[in-house]
Image (cartoon, rainbow, N blue to C red):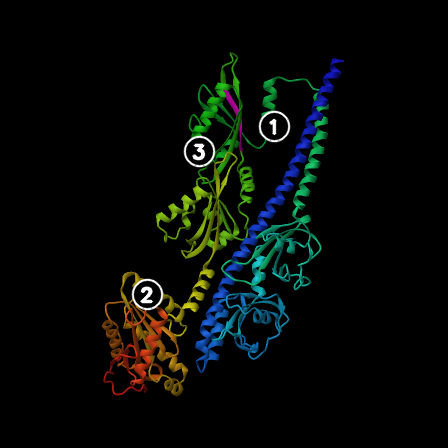
Amino acid sequence: MKRFLRHSRHGLLLAACLGGLGAYLAYNLHGEHERIEAVERERLATQSKVIEDNLTRQLVAINLALESIMVELPDWAGQPDGRERAIRQLKSMKVSMPSVRTFAVLDEKGTVTASNREELLGRNFHDRDYFQTALRALSTKTLYVSAPFKTVLDKFVISVARVMTGPQGQFAGLVSASVDPVDIQILLNSVRYADDMRSMLVHGDGTIFVSQPALAEVIGKNVSLPDSFFRQHLDSKRPVSHFEGISPATGDKRLPVLRTIQPADLAMDKPLVVSLSRELDAMFAPWQRDVRNQLLAYLLLVLLSTMGLWLYRRQRVRQRVNEQRLKLATEAAGVGIWEFDLKTRRYHWDTAMFDLFGLDARMANARNDDWHQLMLPGELERIKAATRAVLKNRQAFNLTFQIRRRDGQVRFMRNRATLHCDAQGAPSRLIGTTEDVTERKLREADLRIAAVAFECQESIMVTDANQLILRVNHAFTELFGYTARDVLGATPRLLQSGRHDPAFYAAMWDGIMRGGAWQGEIWDRRKNGECFPVWLSITVVCGDDGGVSHYVATHTDITLRKAAEDDIRQLAFYDPLTGLPNRRLLQDRLHQAMSQARRERGRLALLFLDLDKFKPVNDAFGHQTGDELLQAVAQRLQACVRESDTVARLGGDEFVLLLPSIEAAQDAMAVAEKIHQAFGQPFALSAGRNATMSFSTGIAVYPEHASDEKALMRHADEAMYQAKAAGRDRFVLFAPASEPATLQPPADRGGTAPTIG
C-alpha cells in the first residue's frame, strides 16, 4: 500500500510539473506573439520616419529651387536670350535634383513658357487641377501639392507648385516641379526588410501615388473611405497611427503604420501620407513554426518523462558520487574536463581543455596555470572569488568568463564544478567541465541587439562594453572596404579620419553615457585612406543587470546628400555665369552690414556699376564673347576690393559693390577711382581679341544718403543713372535733387566707347 502511494505521489508530481511547464510555455508563446507585434510596429514606425526625413529634405530642396526660379524670372524676362537662359538653368537644376522629373514655368493662362523639357514649351495646362487650385486660392506663401495625375506620357506624377503674382497682386502664373515617382520608388523599396512588406505614398486626398512592390491595380486608387485606416489616421491628427485589419487597397489582412508628412516650415496645402505594412500571416510564420516545434518538444518531453518515471521505478539508487560523476560525464560530452588539486594547487586537464584555450600541452608549466594570462581584466579575480565561495559554503561552481586566446580571438567560457572531500570531510579537489559558449552568448546578444539594429540595409558595427569590435555586416565591408577578419577584435578608432579633435570625441561619448545614444555627422576613413562624411548613430545595449553590454553603431554615407545641398545653395545664392553673389545673397549681406553699422554707429557704401555700351559687344561678337567678357570683368572687380567687401552681379551688365565698413564717403570714391583706373587696361579674350570697357558708377553712403536698404539701393541706382546721363565712364556720389551731385570726370583713356579688336 505504501509503495502504491509513493508511486502515485511521483505520478502526481510529474503531472503537476508537466502541467506547469505547459502553462509556462503557453504564457511565453502568448508574450512572444505580443512582443513580435510590438517590435514590428516600432520597426515600421522607424522606417516610416526614415522616409519622412528623406521626403522632407526633398520637398525643402524643391521649394528652394522654386523660389530660386521665381527670383531669376524677372532677370530672364529682361534679357534677349532670357528664354534660352531659363531653359538652360532649369535643365541644370534638373540634373542636380534627380527627385524632380520636370521644372516648368506657366503664365497666367496656363501656357508653359519655360521648362527643362522643351517638348512641353507652348503647351497649355489651364485645365489641370493643380493649376485651377492655385488660381482659386492665389496664395504666394503656399506650396501646392497636387493629387497624383497622369501625364501626357501616361505616367502618374505629383506636381509641387508656387504661385506668382504681378505688380498689382494679380495672378501671374505658376512655377512647378513634378516629382519623379522612380526616385520615390527607390526610397520606398530601400526601407523594405521583408518580402511581404508593402510601402506606399498616398496624397492627402487619399489617392495612392507610389507602391513598393509595384502594384499597378492600386496606383491612382482612392483609399479615403469612411472608417478606412487612412481616414481614421487623418481625422486623429496624430503624426503616426498604428492599425491592424483588412487593407482596403488589396483586401488582405495586414499590420499597417501610417505617418503624415507635412513639415512645419513648408506651407503645404495638402499633406503626404506614407503607409508601411506587413502581412500578418507572413509576419507570424516563424512564431507559428515555433509553436509547432515547442508543442512537439513538449509532447516528446511528456513521453520521455513518463518513460523515465517508469524506468526510475525499476532502478536501484546508486551512490551519490557515482551519480554525480555520471551526470558530469553525460554533460561533458564534447567539452573539456578538468580537476583542481586544492593541496598542490595544480590543474589537471584533458586534451579538449588545451584545444579550447588554444594552448600547447607540451609547453605547460608544472602547475598548468598558463591560462591565467589569457583572462581579460578582472576575470581572474572573479574566478578566485567563486572558488573561495565554493570552499566556504560548499556550493556548486557555475561561472562564465572571457579570455583572449593567443590567436587574438575573444571567447566566452563556462565553468561548472563540484567540490569533493577526503575521508575526513576536508575539501580536497574541484572536478568540473569547461564549455565554449561564445556562440550561445552571441545569439543571446543578438536578441538584444535586434531591437536596436533595425536597419539591415545600413552599415552596422557591434562592439562589446570594452569597445572591441565583435561583428560587422556586409554593408559595413562595402562602405569601408574592411573585411570582418580585418576588424574583429579591433576598436572603432581604426576608422578615424583625423579631422576631429579630442574635444569632439569627448562630447560624443558624454552624450552616449548620459542619453544612451548619440547621432551626428562625422568624417571617417576607408581602408584605402579615403575620407568621407557619414551620419553616425551609436546606441547603448544593456544586459540583464542594467550594465552596458554592447554598443551598436550604424553608418550612412552622406557624400551625395552634402554635394546636392552644396549645389542647391550655389544655385540659390550665386550667379551661375560669374560665380559672384546674386541679388538674394547681396540683400542678405546688406541687411547684416546695415544692422552692424547701426549698432556700431558706423558707415557703409553701396556702389552700382553698369558697363557702358555692353549690348553692342554682344550684338557684334556674340553672347559667348559677351559672357567671357563678363567673367573677366567680375575677376577684375574682385581684385579691386577687400576680402570683407562684396562684389555681386544683379544680372546682365549690372554689378554692385558693398563696402561694409568705411570712414567717410571719400573712401568709397577712392574705391570707385581704383576700379575706373583698373578698367583702363584692356581685357585679353579668346581668339586673340582685346577689349576695353568702362563703367558708369553710382555711390550711396549710409547713413548720410538713406536709413534703410531699399532707399540706399535706390539712391545708388539714381546716382548711377546720373553718371550715365553725364557721359558715362565716371562715378557720381548721390545727392538730393536740391543739391548738386559730386561728379568724377572720366580718366583719359582715349574715349568712352567700348572696343574689341
Query: Is residue 355 visible in this depiction of the protein?
Result: no
Mark 3 belongs to which amino acid?
A: Met
Residue 362, placed above or below residue 3: below
Q: Is there CB contact under 8 Å for labels 1 and 3?
A: no
Residue 102, placed above or below residue 195: below
Q: Specify start and end residues of the magenta stretch as a single range.
A: 429-435
Question: How much space separates mark 1 and mark 3, taking CA atoms?
Answer: 28 Å
Residue 587 magenta: no
Horizontally, residue 394 falls left or right of residue 317, namely: left
Task: Give the mark toward the camera: 1 or 2.
Answer: 2
Mark 1 belongs to which amino acid?
A: Thr
Q: Which of 679 and 396 is in front in this view?
A: 679
Q: Which residue carries the number 1 mark?
A: 330
Question: Looking at the rendered structure, which numbered label has been put on residue 594?
Answer: 2
Residue 537 coordinates in the image, percent (x, y): 47, 49
Q: Which residue carries the number 3 mark?
A: 375
Q: Is there CB contact under 8 Å for labels 2 and 3?
A: no
Label 1 neighbourhood size at 10 Å, few (<14), some (14-19), many (20+)? few
Mark 2 belongs to which amino acid?
A: Met
Residue 436 coordinates in the image, percent (x, y): 53, 35
Query: Is residue 655 visible in this depiction of the protein?
Result: yes
Q: Quadrant of residue 528?
A: bottom left
- The earlier-in-sequence mark between 1 and 3 is 1
